[in-house]
Amino acid sequence: MKSKLLSSIYLLFIIPIFNNIVQSDFKSLNNMVTDNLESIYLGAGCFWCVEAIFQQVNGVIKVTPGYCGGHTKNPTYNEVCSGTSGHVEVAKIVYDKSLVSLDYLLEIFWKTHDPTTLNRQGNDIGTQYRSAIFYNNEDQKILAEDYKKELISKKVFENSIVTEILKINVFYPAENYHHNYYNNNKNQGYCQYVIQPKIEKYKKIFSKNSKTK
């Protein structure tokens, strides 16, 4: 009789309390993880290159190629490449602030493309390839602008920096075949002769925080 009473008390009171504690802890952990996540949008030439580089970075959770900064709604790749949409090819970088700083991500951005060539990266020419940072909040804006000012004051680049720093308005994810492009097309010519050297440059400079050494 006593054991049945104890079992009933356990089922009625102990298990619900335990479940509430577990659910509360899980919710807190979930909120903590979400609070640590931020995103920024970086344009540094072809978004296949930008995606491939930032996929290598520890603390970067997700990289999504897409378009922003223009006037055409729901642009297609062909419209962006025509130069009539006004959009920039960018990569949306979702990162965990507890694992990697925005300052570090901006360092990668500045050192893995040429921010002094207007509407061009190498042989990729057009307004869609312009150097740009699209920020989400004031803290990101200040950090990006301060970083740019420091580069200018220290004359890190021989020519003038043309990188735009703008508030993000709308981000349009690119068509599915652009996603994870380098990893899905490593034998393709552009991947071998343009993207691969950029990844090798990144790994040489930032080897300590690379997912693949």
Image (cartoon, rainbow, N blue to C red):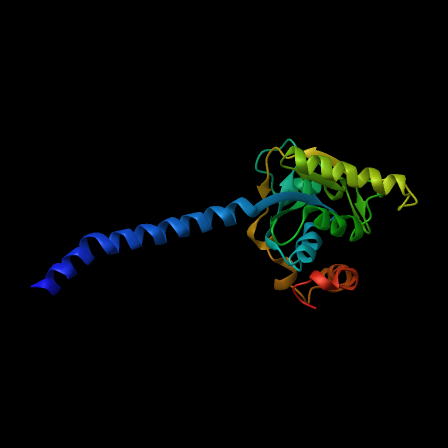
Q: Residue furthest front?
A: 2
Q: Residue furthest top?
A: 71
Q: Quadrant of residue 51?
A: bottom right
Q: Is residue 112 left or right of residue 14?
A: right
Decide which of 197, 72 is in the foreground and name it: 197
Residue plotted at (59% across, 35% down): 170
- Please tell me how many numbered marks the rendered image carries: 0
Figure quadrant of the N terminus: bottom left
Residue plotted at (58% across, 33% down): 73
Question: Residue 80 location, x and y as percent?
Answer: 67, 41
Decide which of 72, 91 is in the foreground and name it: 91
- Residue 10 drawn above or below residue 81: below
Question: Residue 114 location, x and y as percent?
Answer: 82, 48
Q: Quadrant of residue 86?
A: top right
Question: Residue 11 location, x and y as percent?
Answer: 19, 57
Figure quadrant of the C terminus: bottom right
Decide which of 38, 75 is in the foreground and name it: 38
Q: Is residue 22 visible?
A: yes
Question: Residue 34 location, x and y as percent?
Answer: 51, 46
Residue plotted at (61% across, 32% down): 169
Q: Is residue 87 visible?
A: no
Q: Is residue 29 left or right of residue 211?
A: left
